[in-house]
Image (spheres, rainbow, N blue to C red):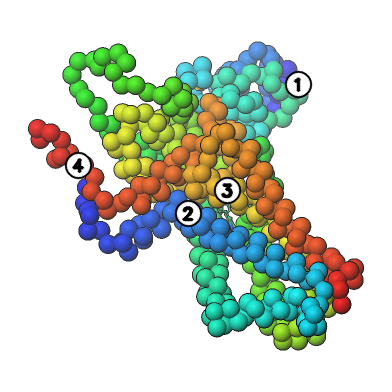
Amino acid sequence: MSAQAPTAPAVARATSALSSTIGLKVVMAVTGIALFGFVLGHMAGNLQVYLPRGADGVWALDAYGEWLRELGHGGAIWVARAGLLLAFVLHVGAAWALSRRSWAARPVSYAKWVAKESTYASRTMRWTGPIVLLFVVYHLLHLTWGSAHPDFRTGGVHHNVTTGLAQPLACGVYVVAMLALGLHLFHGVWSLLQTLGLSHPRYERLRRCAAALLAALVVLGNLSIPIAALAGWLPR
Amino acid sequence: MKIRLQVWRQEHARDAGRFETYEAPDVSPDMSFLELLDVVNERLVLEGREPIAFDHDCREGICGACSVVIDGRPHGPRERTTACQLHMRSFPDGAEITLEPWRASAFPVVKDLIVDRSAFDRIIAAGGFVSAPTGSAPDGNALPIEKENADLAMDAAACIGCGACVAACPNASAMLFTAAKASQLALLPQGQPERWRRATAMVARMDQEGFGSCTNHGECMAACPKGISIDHIARLNRDWIHASLRAGRRTATSGDSAGG
Ligand code: HEM
Ligand code: FES
């Protein structure tokens, strides 16, 4: 069994694992966990937009942003950004490679096909994913670099959020993107458990509920902000 | 009953194929679906036309030969039922029913509704042998097997290899089939020595045959006439990950067995 020779270099093993559909799916699952962890943490941080100014007159969200940028002498944020970018590239790359295989595997589609077990979320993964991708680009232009923001102030996170999201069009983009993300996560969280083989009949209900709960948490937390901004409920 | 059929007709693998319409005015509700096709075919033969080619053998739901997508579902609308065990009473009088072959590049159409499913045989062959001692029959109960595992292995072994899982999957993935064939051995002590090698080899062959990539829709399980669960897919994923992490560690080969 030469393929399993003890000297097989790690690189060769990694490439052979990545040429497998299951290997690529494991990449999607692991990067999916990383991206999900980020969205959850990002959402929790964003909720500070509801907090008032501190004793020093600085908005809680601004202080939080400042803290993030200073963490580890300003290095932590770059490590996190590099990690996220890598996870994104791997996730999208694997999604693209696997989708192409699946399209090639069914060259002639059915004249009639009736869905039974799949969900709306599972059938739209290849739509909700790219929607989230486009949104991330817009979101960075809007609230990180500010070039898509009408009145961007560097370091003025609270100001940028409350004014930026109070515009109906921007608010709409955020709402649509978050609904897409919710669908993506509803199937994605369940799917990644299955991909990683974390399954047991006794916990099947639990897996479904956990996926629904986590997706709902991210979506509702994030949705509340643009809606509150548009309605003028955020502290100014 | 009156039934109208929209049937996929395709002369051979390279023919483009098209739908043709056939009327069946005198259908008994107690006929099986394949008997309906027999009746339609008899008339076609009498009219000097080419009968509809379809796969069938046992006609009792155990061989997996019959393989028609009936109105958008492999083997038709009834759960856990092969096309040969589906009866016309499952359809309303006057129904218009669409018949198509399994659609997957790994299952090329041979003719009309018949596809070549030998890719499945090659996946099984890639799984390889099971180490089993030869000689006289083992003593009863000498090899204890947990009841739960015995049951799960039997569930997996119920697979008749019909390919409905591939046909139903929006990705044309063969994960349920491959997982069932790997699980029926992975759950039993006899399957342990080659368990990890088998998982990677079968998955590699499955990919090589050009099946799509599973995205956990679950359509395979809903279409499976034997109701095989996608829990087996999770088990195959688990085994594949385990095997890949172990790769490079020394595993016993034939030369290691005692006495050469
Ligand atoms: C914040 C961003 C994202 C998060 C948190 C996320 C999360 C996930 C998770 C957890 C999975 C399940 C992996 C598995 O099946 O094992 C997944 C699958 C998938 N993702 Fe993403 N994803 C994100 C962005 C994207 C983007 C930008 C794309 C495409 C451009 C994309 C396309 C896909 C596709 C096609 C699948 C496979 C669908 C399936 O397995 O059913 N995702 N995603
Ligand atoms: S003909 Fe054997 S299962 Fe249908």
Q: Residue at x 12, y 33 (%)?
A: B258
Q: Is the distance from the Cβ of mark 2 to the nearest ligand 1 atom less than 8 Å? A: yes
From this view, report whether residue A70 is shown above or below residue B154.
below
State the CA–CA distance, disc 2 to disc 3. 11 Å
The residue wearing badge 1 is B93
Going from N to C along the chain, the mark reached first, 1 or 4, is: 1
State the CA–CA distance, disc 3 to disc 1. 41 Å
Disc 1 marks a residue whose amino acid type is Asp
Category of crowding for the residue at label 4, using alpha-carbon neighbours closer than 10 angstroms: few (below 14), some (14–19), many (at least 20) = few
Q: Is residue B258 left or right of residue A2?
A: left
Q: Residue at x 52, y 51 (%)?
A: A102
Residues A126 and A33: in front is A33
Disc 2 marks a residue whose amino acid type is Val
Q: Pointer 1 and pointer 4: residues touching (CB < 8 Å)?
A: no
- The image's mark for residue B180 is none
Going from N to C along the chain, the mark reached first, 2 or 3, is: 2
Q: Chain of mark 3?
A: A
